[in-house]
Amino acid sequence: MENAKTESDPKFISIEGIARRYPAPGGGSTTIFEDLWLPVQRGEFVCIIGHSGCGKTSVLNILAGLEEPSDGVVVVDGQAISGPSLDRAVIFQGHALLPWKSVIGNVGYAVSSRWRKAGRAEVEERARRFIDLVGLKGNELKRPAELSGGMRQRVGIARALSIEPKILLMDEPFSALDALTRGTLQDEVRRICKSTGQTVVMITHDVDEAIYLADKIVLMTNGPEAMIAEVVENPLPMERARDSIHREENYYAVRNHLVDFLVSRSRTFKAEMPAGYDRRHPPVVRLGRPPEPAPAPANTIPFPVIASARD
Ligand SMILES: Nc1ncnc2c1ncn2[C@@H]1O[C@H](COP(=O)(O)OP(=O)(O)OP(=O)(O)O)[C@@H](O)[C@H]1O
Ligand SMILES: [Mg+2]
C-alpha cells in the first residue's frame, strides 16, 4: 500500500468555500449550503454528522467529483478536483455492484480499470487479496443477487480499497445493515484504514459509529443554508476497542456533546452563533484537553474547550 501517513500535510484535502444551490420551484434558488471550508489531513478519518437534508451527500458527491459545486473549489493533494477519479473511491449506501459480474469480477473490474496494463493473473491475485481482507473468501464466484446485504457491502468495500485510492469516501456505508454485521464491518474498515494510513471522509447519522471510527467529527447544522458548526477532535485513544470504548475517559463527554448538538444545537446554532465564528476556520472542539499550546488557566472550565482551527 502506498498511502502511508506522511508528516505535516494539514490540507491534503482542502474544501474551499463550496456552495450547493438548486433552482427553487417558484423561481430563484435554494441554498443547501454555502461558503463551506474544511481541511482534512492525510491519513485522517473524518466523519460528517448532520440531520437529513443538510447536504452531507452533496458534499461527498462534490468531493468525489460526481457533482460540481455551485461555488468554490475542492483541492486534493494540490490539485483542484474537476471530475471523478480513481484516486477517490466511493462506497455508496446502495453498494452499486455490477449485477452480472461475480464477486471477483466486480473487484477485478475495478483493479483492471486502475492498472490497465496488469495481466489477468495479477488482477485476480489482487482482487482475491481484498476479497479475503473483507472476509468473503469462498464467495468469489457468486453474483450480487446470491449475496446478503452485508456481503454486498463487503464487496463494495473490497472494490473501493483494492484500487488504493488516495481518498476513501463513504456515504452511510453501514446504515442498512443489522447491528452484528455493522459492528464487524466497522471493525474491518477501521483496521484496514488505520493500518494503511487511508484518508477517509465518511457520512453517518450514528454518533457511536463516529466516535468509534473517526479522528475528527464534523458537525453540520440543519439545512437549508447549512453550515459547519464545529469540528470535534475525538479525544479517545487511537487504540480503542468496540467492547470497551464506553469505559474510555471522555467517552461520555464526547457522546453527550454530539447528541446535544443533534438534539438542539444543530437547530439553534445559527441564531446563537459564538462570537468570532469564522466560516473559513470552523471552531475545533477539544474535549477534556486544554487549548494548545498554552495550558488553560486554573479558573477556566476544562471542557468543552473550543479552539480556532488556526491553532
Ligand atoms: N437535484 C436536486 N434538486 C433539488 N434539490 C435537491 C436535489 N438534490 C438534493 N436536493 C436537496 O438538497 C438537500 C441536501 O440533500 P443531500 O442528499 O445532500 O442531504 P443529506 O444531508 O445527505 O440527507 P440524508 O441524511 O437524508 O441522506 C435536500 O434538501 C435535498 O432535497
Ligand atoms: Mg445523504
Image (cartoon, rainbow, N blue to C red):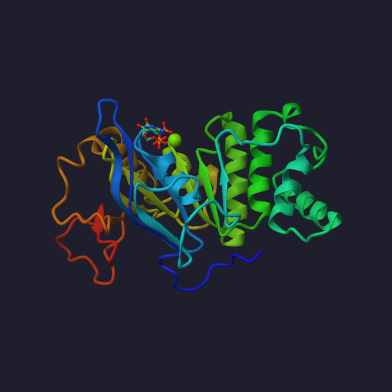
The foreground one among 140 and 197 is 140
Location of residue 227 with respect to 236 vertically, above or below: above
Residue 190 left/right relative to 300: right
Can you see residue 301? yes
Residue 162 picture location, percent across and down: 68, 53
Q: Quadrant of residue 174?
A: top right
**Ligand 1 quadrant assignment:** top left
The number of discs equals 0
Q: Quadrant of residue 222?
A: top left
Location of residue 175 with respect to 78 vertically, above or below: above
Residue 84 left/right relative to 68: right
Residue 292 picture location, percent across and down: 28, 68
Q: Residue at x 27, y 63 (%)?
A: 290
Q: Given the current orientation, which residue lies at the most extreme front position?
A: 27
Q: Residue at x 82, y 39 (%)?
A: 138
Q: Residue at x 73, y 27 (%)?
A: 145
Can you see residue 52? no
Residue 251 picture location, percent across and down: 39, 47
Q: Residue at x 61, y 60 (%)?
A: 195
The foreground one among 282 and 299 is 282
Residue 276 picture location, percent across and down: 15, 57
Which quadrant of the figure contains the C terminus? bottom left
Location of residue 21 with respect to 279 vertically, above or below: above
Which quadrant of the figure contains the N terminus? bottom right
Residue 175 left/right relative to 228: right
